[in-house]
Amino acid sequence: MAADVVIELKAVERHYVQGQRKLTILNGVDFSLHRGEMVALVAPSGTGKSTLLHTAGLLERPDAGDVMLAGRACGRLSDDERTAIRRNDIGFVYQFHHLLPEFSAVENIMMPQLVKGLPATEARARAMQLLDYMQIAKRAEHRPAELSGGEQQRVAIARAVANAPLVLLADEPTGNLDPTTASYVFDALSALVRQSGLAALIATHNHELARRMDRRVTLSEGHVVPL
Ligand SMILES: Nc1ncnc2c1ncn2[C@@H]1O[C@H](COP(=O)(O)OP(=O)(O)OP(=O)(O)O)[C@@H](O)[C@H]1O
């Protein structure tokens, strides 16, 4: 395995059973993501983008094959071990921000750090640094309902990287934003990826944003192939 491969899917299969039918969604996916790289996952609805992201992010177990994170095989680890890896090494961003409504922006970004066991002062300092980086430090004390859609997504991105993960997995992170805001949020996201050396796999229907990433892949007959 190349030294800078952060996450590698090896012959990953994922099937769902619906009544009498077996649906094959991932049919032997081989795919690697490298440090500092942003890859767009562009594929029609229902082809398995979320399934791929959930499997890569250890939210779902593959039915066959394995997911290697920094060279470590994760398929046979216990649920607790997988949860610990998810908490420390994997960041998720979804189409809808899923911020905790009763907490402020800065508190939302502190939360994963506190769960990891960091002292509150350290967690707050890191959260403020990230808010500053995302150019929304002035909104630190606002609750999600008091933020615009673009601001909410920037907080969600900051939260996803709060524990300095190895990988960022994003499922339509700009999907509910207007084109100008989407572009602005994407700029902030890509600056963060470049600056931190993260690896990012980003599912998007936005071809303009996909063009701005390092590579584009799609899902075809259960395989990840270049687009
Ligand atoms: N738990 C499940 N049980 C049965 N079928 C499922 C399950 N989860 C997903 N599927 C099916 O697997 C296929 C892939 O779903 P997935 O959500 O990964 O697609 P997607 O490419 O992310 O779609 P979209 O762009 O619409 O979000 C779909 O046909 C879906 O109906």
Image (spheres, grey):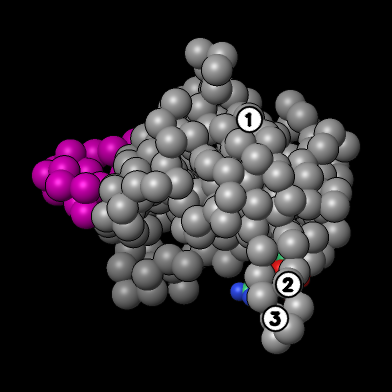
Amino acid at the residue labelled 1: Ser
Instruction: Report crowding for label 2: few under 14, some 14 to 19, many 20 or more residues within 10 A (C-alpha).
Output: few
Who's the residue at 60% across and 38% down the image? 9
Please give the residue where the numbered disc 3 appears in the rendered image. Answer: 18
Please give the residue where the numbered disc 1 appears in the rendered image. Answer: 32
- Observer able to see residue 181: no
Q: Quadrant of ligand 1?
A: bottom right
The numbered mark, 1 or 3, whose residue comes first in the sequence reads 3
Q: Report x, y in % for residue 35.
A: 54, 22
Depicted 165 relative to depicted 36: above or below: below
- Can you tell me whether the CB of the residue at mark 2 lies under 8 Å from the nearest atom of ligand 1? no
Amino acid at the residue labelled 3: Gln
Describe the element under mark 2 as helix, strand or loop.
Answer: strand
- Can you tell me whether the CB of the residue at mark 1 lies under 8 Å from the nearest atom of ligand 1? no
> Principal SS element in the magenta part?
helix
Q: Are marks 1 and 3 in contact (CB under 8 Å)?
A: no
Instruction: State the residue in front, 51 or 45.
Output: 51
Depicted 132 relative to depicted 58: above or below: above
Give the left or right position of residue 66, taking residue 119 as reference: right
Magenta residues? 113-129
- Residue that lies at the very extreme toward the bottom in this rendered image: 19
Determine which quarter of the picture holds residue 24.
bottom right
Please give the residue where the numbered disc 2 appears in the rendered image. Answer: 22
Q: How many marks?
A: 3
Describe the element under mark 1 as helix, strand or loop.
Answer: strand
Q: Report x, y in % for residue 126.
A: 28, 38
Depicted 144 relative to depicted 91: above or below: below
- Can you tell me whether the CB of the residue at mark 3 lies under 8 Å from the nearest atom of ligand 1? yes
